[in-house]
Image (cartoon, helix red, strand yellow):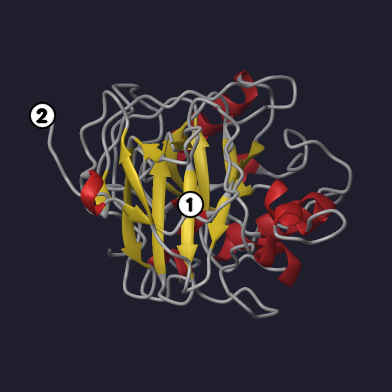
């Protein structure tokens, strides 16, 4: 059923499409701003969503009785689709507390935004890559406000528009948009689960990691919706994977993969959407230069020269467990 909502809380059901090439090319929207860390203005990666279980350890959570089958499905999916789990890069836009808001209107065919209240502090110079998703995260550390938008674009006159999305306050949110709001098909916040430049610069990822799968089957908590369809045996959106604490660190991992491995033990990875390959999510590398930084961004540096489809090679994915999620 179609419904109308304000831009503050708006989303819709849709099918995600990712173009996957030899390098597992992914949808991206690059916007200019300060990089968004899970800790703003700090040398460590602290909690951005302090009230959310995504920022809390799940190392002691019980294993789900359906764990073995769902892990086997995950392994089969990445082996069938390009033979590896890659990294999807998500652009993030952080703005000052004085950044003036602009109106974001409703795209043709979308009914979820009310233009008169669709105000988001998008700065001059923000731009996208004209891909199928054109996703945008706008984060305002001074207020703790987070806007996550889908199919966002600007016309020649500087007028912004988008299809679906939502807004929340990170300091009191559990990291899941209430139905039917948010950008992801599951309702899980991208900002709460994306690996940021600051995470990697600090040497540690202190939150659960976003994961996309190729096929999924409905949804389970913490997701509050899905666009999966019926694929029996596949992980539902919201499935929470964890690496067992007893799994030894494999040799030969890139610095990035070592950080991901440690995070998987403490915080796990959560399925928030589907894509053309199995991937986890990290901040877009182009944010680094657009923020005025020089040199190569920390995430790309931590890949040790490997492309996004090979940077996690050597990870013992078959050792993963599906856990019973914390309460949301």
The 10 Å Cα crowd at callout 2, few under 14, some 14 to 19, many 20 or more, is: few
Residue highlighted by disc 1: 137
Name which quarter of the figure residue 159 lies in.
Answer: top left
Above-or-below relation of 175 to 229: below
Judge by depth and name the residue closer to the eye, 202 or 57.
Answer: 202
- Residue 249 in view of the camera: no
Report the label total. Answer: 2
Q: Is residue 144 left or right of residue 280?
A: left
- Which quadrant of the rendered structure holds the N terminus? top left
Q: Nearer the viewer, mark 2 or mark 1?
A: 1
* Residue 158, x across and y down, in percent: 48, 41
For the point 57% across and 27% down, the residue is 277
Instruction: Tell which residue pokes out farthest to the front in this image.
Output: 157
- Per the image, label 2 sits on a secondary structure element best described as loop
Question: What residue is rendered at 72% in x and 72% in y?
Answer: 202
User: What number is the disc on residue 1?
Assistant: 2
Q: Earlier in the sequence, mark 2 or mark 1?
A: 2
Q: Secondary structure at mark 1?
A: strand
Residue 111 - label: none
Place of residue 157 in the rendered image (x, y in percent of width and height, measured from the top left): 47, 37
Q: Nearer the viewer, residue 106 or 17?
A: 106
Q: CA distance from mark 2 to mark 1?
A: 26 Å
Instruction: Decide: few, some or many residues near mark 1? Use Cα within 10 Å; few <14, some 14-19, many ≥20.
Output: many
Vertical comparison of 21 with 127: above or below: above
Q: Where on the picture, by quarter, is residue 266? A: bottom right
Residue at the image point whose x is 61% and y is 61% from the top: 263
* Image x and y of residue 119, in percent: 33, 55
> Is 210 left or right of 251, judged from the image as shown?
left
Place of residue 288 in the rendered image (x, y in percent of width and height, measured from the top left):
73, 56
Quadrant where the C terminus is found in the figure: bottom left
Q: Quadrant of residue 315?
A: top right
Seen in the picture, residue 30 relative to 328 is either above or below; the reply is above
């Amino acid at each position: 059923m179609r419904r109308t909502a304000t831009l503050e809380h708006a989303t819709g059901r849709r099918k995600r499409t990712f173009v996957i090439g030899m390098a597992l090319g992914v949808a991206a929207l690059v916007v200019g701003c300060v990089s968004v860390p899970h800790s703003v203005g700090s040398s460590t990666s602290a909690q951005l969503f302090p009230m959310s279980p995504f920022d809390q350890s799940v190392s002691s959570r019980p294993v789900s009785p359906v764990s073995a089958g769902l892990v086997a499905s995950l392994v089969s999916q990445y082996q069938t689709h390009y033979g590896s789990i890659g990294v999807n890069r998500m652009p993030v836009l952080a703005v000052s507390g004085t950044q003036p808001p602009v109106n974001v209107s409703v795209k043709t065919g979308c009914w979820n935004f009310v233009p008169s209240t669709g105000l988001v502090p998008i700065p001059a110079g923000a731009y996208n890559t004209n891909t199928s998703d054109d996703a945008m995260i706008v984060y305002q550390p001074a207020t703790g406000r987070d806007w996550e938008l889908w199919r966002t674009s600007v016309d020649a006159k500087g007028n912004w528009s988008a299809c679906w999305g939502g807004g929340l306050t990170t300091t009191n949110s559990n990291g899941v948009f209430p139905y039917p709001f948010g950008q992801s098909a599951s309702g899980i916040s991208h900002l709460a689960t994306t690996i940021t430049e600051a995470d990697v610069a600090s040497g540690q990822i202190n939150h659960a990691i976003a994961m996309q799968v190729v096929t999924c089957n409905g949804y389970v908590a913490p997701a509050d919706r899905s666009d999966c369809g019926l694929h029996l045996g596949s992980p539902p959106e919201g499935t929470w994977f964890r690496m067992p604490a007893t799994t030894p660190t494999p040799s030969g991992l890139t610095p990035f993969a070592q950080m991901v491995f440690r995070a998987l033990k403490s915080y796990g990875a959560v399925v928030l959407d589907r894509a053309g390959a199995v991937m986890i999510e990290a901040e877009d590398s182009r944010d680094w230069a657009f923020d005025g930084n020089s040199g190569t961004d920390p995430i790309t540096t931590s890949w040790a020269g490997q492309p996004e489809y090979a940077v996690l090679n050597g990870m013992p994915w078959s050792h993963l467990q599906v856990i019973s999620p914390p309460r949301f």
